[in-house]
Image (spheres, helix red, strand yellow):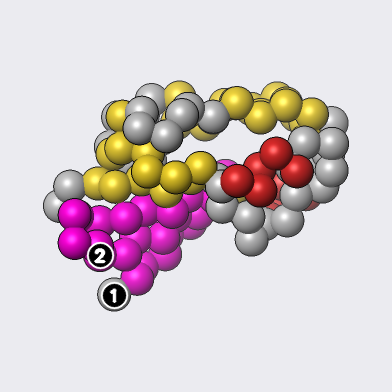
Amino acid sequence: MKTMDEYDDWWLVKEPSQEGTMVTIGFLSSRIQEWGHLLFLDLPMVGAILNRGDLFVSIEAANAITFSASPVTGKIIAINPALNGWVNHQASGSDWLMKLLIKD
């Protein structure tokens, strides 16, 4: 069963998989609108291990520079390929950043 949680800057969806729990992370549309046009986005690579609390994304936008801490501990299994198109435009809140596999 899928579950969705929202936090100050981002949302995450948890869903069971054969290897554990897959977590999809994205930023809230309200935050993206507040930040304005994205100028720079830095994410870790697929295969990287994140620990809860690690800084895992940095964003430079027209109205903000922000860094976010990982909400979970897990291995990055996918980065949204559409992210290349995020820079220099207004991203929508439905866009996801990455998928991680966490152990239950």
Q: Residue at x 60, y 26 (%)?
A: 42
- State whether residue 82 is above or below residue 17: above
Quarter of the picture containing the N terminus is: bottom left
Q: Residues within 10 Å of mark 2 (few under 14, many from 20)?
A: some
Residue 16 painted magenta:
yes
Residues at marks 2 and 1 touching, judged by CB atoms closer than 8 Å: yes
* Main secondary structure found in the magenta portion: strand
Q: Which mark is residue 46?
A: none
Residue 8 at x, y percent in the picture? 54, 46
Q: Amino acid at mark 1?
A: Met
- Circle nearer the N terminus (2, 1): 1
Q: Disc 1 marks which residue?
A: 1
Q: Amino acid at mark 2?
A: Pro
- State whether residue 53 is above or below residue 93: above
Front-lying residue, 5 or 104: 104
Residue 31 at x, y percent in the picture? 68, 47
* CA–CA distance in space, label 2 to label 1: 7 Å
Q: How many marks?
A: 2
Regarding residue 62, the answer to whether it shows in the image is yes
Q: Which contiguous range is marked in magenta?
A: 2-26
Q: Give SS at disc 1.
A: loop
Residue 85 relative to residue 44: left or right: right
Residue 77 at x, y percent in the picture? 37, 43
Q: Residue at x 28, y 39 (%)?
A: 74
Q: Disc 2 marks which residue?
A: 16
